[in-house]
Structure formats: structure tokens, C-alpha cells
Image (cartoon, grey):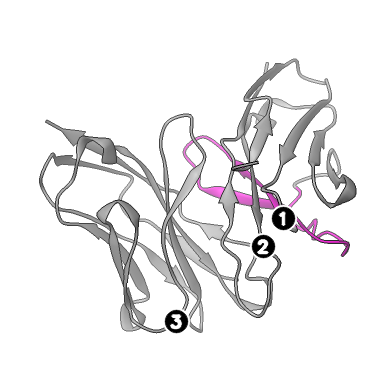
Amino acid sequence: GAGVSQSPSNKVTEKGKDVELRCDPISGHTALYWYRQSLGQGLEFLIYFQGNSAPDKSGLPSDRFSAERTGGSVSTLTIQRTQQEDSAVYLCASSRTRTGGVNIQYFGAGTRLSVL
Amino acid sequence: AQSVTQPDIHITVSEGASLELRCNYSYGATPYLFWYVQSPGQGLQLLLKYFSGDTLVQGIKGFEAEFKRSQSSFNLRKPSVHWSDAAEYFCAVGAGSNDYKLSFGAGTTVTVRA
């Protein structure tokens, strides 16, 4: 597609429920990132996928958070047993394969998650 | 690990006036530096980046930024602001062996008054 696509754009859920957030990266981009943007905060790195390599999960805040990337393209971020503090905008980004330099990350519009 | 500070939470500027947004980073060597803009309900759009070379970089929408190593700064400027520049601006840094993990400042919200 022309840009990074995220769905849903908004998600309201009840505390304790599981949610899945989807990211469809730019075609041809092999790297994919998830960030979380809490109210009044900058973006917080969550997880990074690069091709078939093991993902860097070092930013995931708890074991309730997990992510997968199927077929090297679409990614799903899953939050189990949601808590109110999980309320935030979840942003996905993608970039080309890194070849000796830093990648430029292109961001989607995000999913606004509200946990009641 | 690197960190980024954007000292100004909110700036109000008149249309046609100049704008400068401050960004300071903490890192021992020269990092990769970015400015992104986020309009309401939108994702982040890259305005400009600095990797190496000329310390004054030009970006889209008439923005420019200057990397000053001595001050660990990467301030964003625009000579004449348009109402459409009202948005939130984020400075970001990528550094070291994990430079894909961008560190973002908390953002500066820009309001443009007529």
C-alpha cells in the first residue's frame, strides 16, 4: 500500500479483555516497529521485527503484551487482560532493510486504545 | 542509552512569524537525529533528518534544523509559520548498536494564531 495501515483506528474495551491491534507495513519494507504514545508523553519503543531475525522485544512493558509478524508482512500486537494504564495510542512504523545506516521509519496513524 | 529533551511543552506563534523548537539530546557520540510532525488524528510525518555532513539540514514544508554538537542540540526552525503548521512536533534520536530504537522527546505543541 501507499503507507503504513493500522486497524482499528479506535478501540474501546473493558478492563480484563484481550485486544488485537493490526499493522500492515509499506510494501517492500522488511523492518517493522511498534511504539506506544501515552497521553502527554513521547513515543515509547515496544518491539522491532527485522526480516526473519528474532524480534527485539525489550520494550514490551509486561508479559501481557505480545506481537507477531506473519509472513514477514502484517503484524499483530496483542494485549491480554487489559488494564486502564494500557490506554494509549499504539503506533506502528516500517522501514527498509538496514544496509549500513539507520533506517527512516514511516508511521501509521495509530490505534487509540481506551480501556474502561 | 540516549535521551531527548524538548524543553517547551507548548508554543503559540502568530501566523507569518518565525518559529524555533528546541531539542537537546544526551549521547556520547553523534546520533541520528529526526524531527517528526503529528497532526491531530494522524501518524507521524518525517520533516527532516540528520545523519552526517552539513549540520544545517533542509526538510519538507519549509522547515530546517541545525545540528550543534557543542550544545547537543538539534533545533527546528521555520522563517514564516502558516496556520497549517499547528501540530505536535517530536524530536527523535537513534544511536549506538540499537539505533532502530528511536528515543522521542515528549513533544512540543504549536498553536498558530491569526
User: In the image, which residues are magenta?
Assistant: A31-60
The answer to whether A56 appears left or right of B5 in the picture is right
The disc labelled 1 sits on which kind of residue? Gly
Q: Chain of mark 1?
A: A
Report the Cα–Cα distance between label 3 and label 1: 26 Å
Looking at the image, tell me whether mark 2 or mark 1 is earlier in sequence order. 1
The answer to which image quadrant residue A62 occupies is: top right
Position of residue B34 measured from the top left corner of the image (x, y, whole percent): 45, 62
Residue topped by disc 1: A28
Circles 2, 1 touching at the beta carbon (< 8 Å): yes
Q: Chain of mark 3?
A: B
State the SS at label 1: loop
Position of residue A59 measured from the top left corner of the image (x, y, whole percent): 73, 54
Quadrant for the N terminus of chain A in the image = top right
Q: Nearer the viewer, residue B109 or A29?
A: A29
For the point 56% across and 48% down, the residue is A43
Circles 2, 3 touching at the beta carbon (< 8 Å): no
Residue topped by disc 3: B52
State the SS at label 2: loop
Residue topped by disc 2: A96
> Does label 1 lie on the same chain as label 3?
no
> Does label 3 lie on the same chain as label 2?
no
Magenta highlight on residue A58: yes
The disc labelled 2 sits on which kind of residue? Arg
The answer to whether B60 appears left or right of A71 in the picture is left
